[in-house]
Image (cartoon, grey):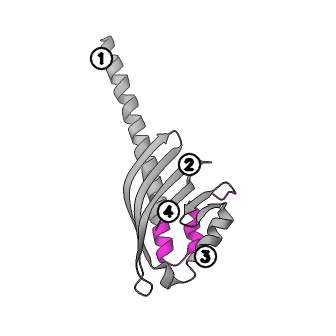
Amino acid sequence: MRNWLFTLILLATCTFAFAQSDKDKEEVLAILRQQEADWNQGNIKSFMNGYWNSDSLMFVGKAGITYGYKATYERYMKSYPDNATMGKLKFTFLNFSFPGPGVAFVVGKFHLTRPEKGDLEGHYTLLFKKIKGKWLIICDHTSG
């Protein structure tokens, strides 16, 4: 009886933890889907809503490290000044994990379809943190 009760409690705990992870995973994926939609509408300002609005935000790209929300936004605006340069974005998710409480790690591939400028693609790693109940990108490493 004692072992049966222990097993039941263990299963209930595992089920709750799994359900919580699924909910959090869906929240993070929803942010990325919204970013994809915002990008495809040419709206970098809305695309940036997925990022932590902090001087501690870190973006790592081929030009090096950019620190801060404002600097990251300005980098995007300079690199993608018009819709032809932005193209149409497609994310492919390759790996998703929760390395700790309130932290999510996403690895994926991006593809920009740009008929006038030539397509661009590469990989990204995103570190999300749950801040004040909201998942936000605190570190983005994109190669492309």
Q: Nearer the viewer, residue 44 or 10?
A: 44
Label 3 or label 2, whichever lies nearer to me, is 3
Q: Earlier in the sequence, mark 3 or mark 2?
A: 3
Quarter in which the N terminus is drawn: top left
Q: Is residue 53 magenta?
A: yes
Residue 129: which disc? 2
Q: Amino acid at mark 4?
A: Thr
- The single residue placed furthest to the top in the displayed view is 2
* Mark 1 secondary-structure assignment: helix
**Residue 23 falls inside the magenta stretch:** no
Say what secondary structure mark 2 lies in: strand
Seen from this angle, which residue lies furthest bottom? 116
Query: What amino acid type is highlighted by mark number 2?
Result: Lys
Q: Nearer the viewer, mark 4 or mark 3?
A: 4
Q: Which circle's residue, 3 or 1, is located before the other in the chain?
A: 1
Q: Is residue 119 above or below residue 13?
A: below
Structural distance between the alpha carbons of marks 4 and 2: 18 Å
Q: CA distance from mark 3 to mark 1?
A: 60 Å
What amino acid type is highlighted by mark number 3? Met
Magenta stretch prevailing secondary structure: helix
Residue 122 image-quadrant placement: bottom left
Q: Position of residue 76 (x, y in %)?
A: 58, 72
When the figure is inspected, residue 53 is found, relative to residue 37, above or below; the finding is: above
Mark 3 neighbour density, 10 Å: few (under 14) some (14–19) many (20 or more): some
Residue at horizontal 45 percent and vertical 84 percent from the top: 117
Q: Residues within 10 Å of mark 2 (few under 14, many from 20)?
A: many
Q: Give the spatial CA distance, label 4 vs label 3.
A: 16 Å
Label 4 or label 1, whichever comes before in sequence order: 1
The label number, if any, that marks residue 142 in the structure image: 4
